[in-house]
Amino acid sequence: MTVSDLPRRRFIKHGIAAITIAGIAGCVGDDDENGNNNGENGDDPDSIATDWASSAPNWDGEIHDFTGQASVTVENGQPSRTDPFFFEPPAIRIDTGTTVTWTWIDDQNHSVTEDGNAFDSGDMQGEGTEFEHTFDEAGVYLYYCRPHLAANQRGAVIVE
């Protein structure tokens, strides 16, 4: 081995290591191209939704089943100044093609922002304000209120 062989050998060694790491990283994630968690790699949709929504202040341990319905309404906000911020219900199950409408129940600034960028209302304000999204792809969609994420205002939609 000569001194001139060392840089090339190091280059090949580091290149193989980088390719190996990139390949492993590509296998670890389970979000699809739209950012929604589609339950690949053995992840259970109910567990994913529960893990996310369980820190919501109004979490009751239930994923509310709205399968078979064409539309569902979720409340967004704070019912009174003494209540926490929440989405009600915090976790729902729907069919593909269902439209979910989030309705603001107070006059504060809120958003409906999906964690993987599948949808985002932007910050909106005013009681009665609405944002809707039709879910055309199966998966688990985890979302939050951008201004109140620190208060754990979050929710989940399982689409079957």
Image: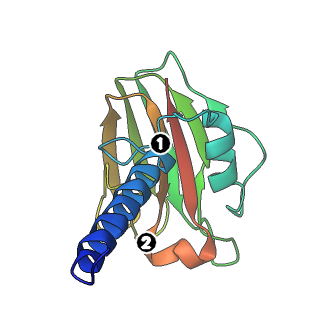
Mark 1 vs mark 2: in front: 1
> Horizontal placement of 117 versus 17: left or right?
left
Viewer can see residue 123: no
Of the pair 127 and 69, the residue shown nearer to us: 69
**Can you tell which quarter of the image residue 10 is in?**
bottom left
> Horizontal placement of 29 versus 51: left or right?
left
Q: Residue furthest top?
A: 68
- Report the residue at 23% width, 72% height from top: 8
Residue 144, compared with residue 5, is above or below; it is: above
Of the pair 43 and 134, the residue shown nearer to us: 43
Viewer can see residue 11: yes
- Report the residue at 50% width, 49% height from top: 28
x and y, in percent, of residue 32 in the image: 36, 41
- Report the residue at 34% width, 23% height from top: 97
**Can you tell which quarter of the image residue 117 is in?**
bottom left
Query: For the residue marked with disc 1, what is the amino acid?
Result: Asn
Q: Do the residues bearing badges 1 and 2 touch, measured as CB atoms within 8 Å?
A: no
- Position of the N terminus, as image quadrant, is bottom left
Say which residue label 1 marks: 37
> Horizontal placement of 109 versus 46: left or right?
left
Label 1 sits on a secondary structure element that is: loop
- Tag shown at residue 146: 2
* Mark before the other along the chain sequence, 1 or 2: 1
The crowding category of the residue bearing disc 2, from other C-alpha atoms within 10 Å (few below 14, some 14 to 19, many at least 20), is many
Label 2 sits on a secondary structure element that is: helix
> Horizontal placement of 66 versus 53: left or right?
left
- Report the residue at 41% width, 55% height from top: 20
The crowding category of the residue bearing disc 1, from other C-alpha atoms within 10 Å (few below 14, some 14 to 19, many at least 20), is many
Q: CA distance from mark 1 to mark 2?
A: 20 Å
Query: For the residue marked with disc 2, what is the amino acid?
Result: Arg
**Can you tell which quarter of the image residue 14 is in?**
bottom left
Of the pair 76 and 135, the residue shown nearer to us: 135
